[in-house]
Image (cartoon, helix red, strand yellow):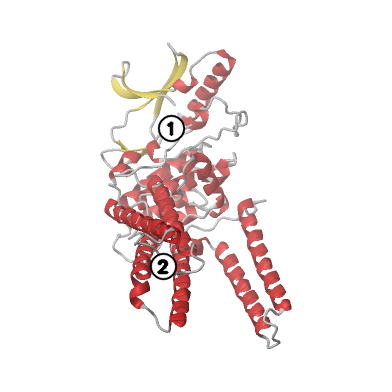
Amino acid sequence: MGEVWEARDETLDRQVAVKVISLLAGGGSRGDEARARFLREARITARLQHPYVVTVHDLGQSDTQEGTVPFLVMELVRGEGLDAKLRDGSVDLAEAARWGAQICEALGDAHAHGIMHRDIKPSNILITPAGRAKVLDFGVARAADPYAAGDRLTRTGFIVGTPPYMAPEQARGHPEPRSDLYALGCLLFELVTGRLPFQAPDSVSYLTAHLSRQPPAPSSVAAGVPQAWDALLLRLLRKDPAERYASAADAAQALRGLADAPEHVPAATARLPEAAPSPPAAGSSPGTPAVARSWIAVAVWFFIALVAATVTAANLDGDSDGRDVAGGAGAVTVATGGLIVWFAVQARSRWQARLALPLRFLPPTFLFCLYALVVAAAVTDEASSSGGIEWGYWLPAGGGSALMLGGLLAMAAALTPRTERRTRGIGYALVGVNAVAVVGTFALMASGGFWFHYVWFVAPHWVPPAVGVAAIALYCTREITTRRAAPASGTERPPVSAP
């Protein structure tokens, strides 16, 4: 939005911070209107007097080479931004809980004055040398937007806030006080695990994730996170604001309980103090993405039932021994059970979080099982046709490539933002070995002159190379995704945009 300068108040002879909002520089009626609104909003936020809020001392306008610009004179805080501490990786669970409680107290005071922050994120939190959190820029994000109109930004479709930390209702243009609690949940999730609850390549993907995806449990992302943290953060990150803590004060109470709990105590003895559940908001309804997923699940079940009924009626083997009926009934039973489990999981965010980690291993397991099934069938056919299994014939190619493929799939499943460079290097080596095997198999199929390949006698011949290519694609996709979501200490981070 502009620049922050250290300055000296000549009247009171003290050091201050002056924030120049150069985004609102310029002339014309629109510029004058935007600056007037900014100053009006800033006067409201200047009423906040709280030990965990950076105090605004003065405000005004000044003529510069770029035109007239508004500025804020604020308390000068010596300390370090929370974003810098995240990059250093120097935050423990007790500190995260203590700072989170202090931020909640600041939010509670602001909400009591009718002020929302709208842009809680690490760079808007300062940590003083004494270990106290200070919240910056209350209301400045909305006030500084030159296209704001009332509570919604309707002229350009621009939404106030930072996408990686934005609540679903704020993404839709309807922020409320508990939107700040959602943003705080994203911030605390990052402090506790080293990564954001959602990983996305751009702002639109972040907003889509906040609107439609369920966050994982922190303990499934980082080792050593107690279950009490899972309960607190997953409650802060509920899609429906009515399901979050009723107020910032309730969230602060829960965080203080975590700050006082010894980190080495098992989660069962360090239970989260739960606030009373909030009544559902009037007129609240499930989000459209969840409804769409439900209809898709029902459609899949209906498709399976239809296919089973068709196959049963066709009596493919021509025998009336009941096997077709039993097979069709079994398929419908399994599909029905799966549908019931799916709806049960969708209704419980904790179950979804618990399944997040095992589901990472589902694609690799499927690929390896497919490969093993095809190879086993081919080896059986080879043995039956030749009168015995020629171990020396198929084992070097089949066994070696199976080990390489299995290792690559295990690496792909285990990739997380905290994976070390050495482990990634092993994954790159496995990608290379599998790539050579894939190329060798195609070369063998074409000319028969390449020595390193997947099982070449499998029919159809393209199945093993296709599985190898899919495994390489899976590894590369997860590698790109996890590097984008990795913490800033040692790896790249997703870009964080400001209004």
Q: Would residue 51 be seen by someone viewing this image from the given angle?
A: no
Count neighbours of disc 1 (C-alpha within 10 A) and say few if under 14, some if 14 to 19, many if 20 or more: many
Question: Which residue appears at 28% of the width and 62% of the height?
Answer: 264
Quarter location, residue 441: bottom left
Toward the viewer: 15 or 25? 25
From the viewer's perspective, is 320 left or right of 161?
right
Marks 2, 1: nearer the viewer: 2
Amino acid type at circle 2 is Val
Q: Give the residue displayed 72% in from the left and 77% down from the top.
A: 314
Indicate whether 26 appears above or below 146. Answer: above
- Please report whichever mark, 2 or 1, sits nearer to the chain's N-terminal start: 1
Query: Which residue is more in the foreground, 106 or 229?
Result: 229
The residue under label 2 is 455
Image spot of residue 415 (x, y percent): 37, 56
Can residue 371 be seen by looking at this rendering?
yes
> Where residue 315 sits in the image (x, y, percent)?
71, 80
In which quadrant of the rendered image does the N terminus lie?
top left
Above or below 342: residue 197: above
Q: Locate residue 149, reporting x and y percent.
A: 61, 28
Q: Where is 408 relative to 380, above or below?
A: above
Q: What residue is rendered at 50% in x and 22% in y?
A: 39
Please determine whether, in this image, residue 35 is positioned above or below residue 271: above
Relative to the observer, which residue lies in front, 150 or 445?
445
Q: In this figure, which residue is indicated by the disc labeled 1?
A: 137
Mark 1: amino acid:
Asp
Dots 2, 1 in contact, CB < 8 A: no
Tally the numbered discs: 2
Q: Secondary structure at mark 2?
A: loop
Give the distance between the C-alpha atoms of the residues marked 2 and 1, in whole angstroms: 62 Å
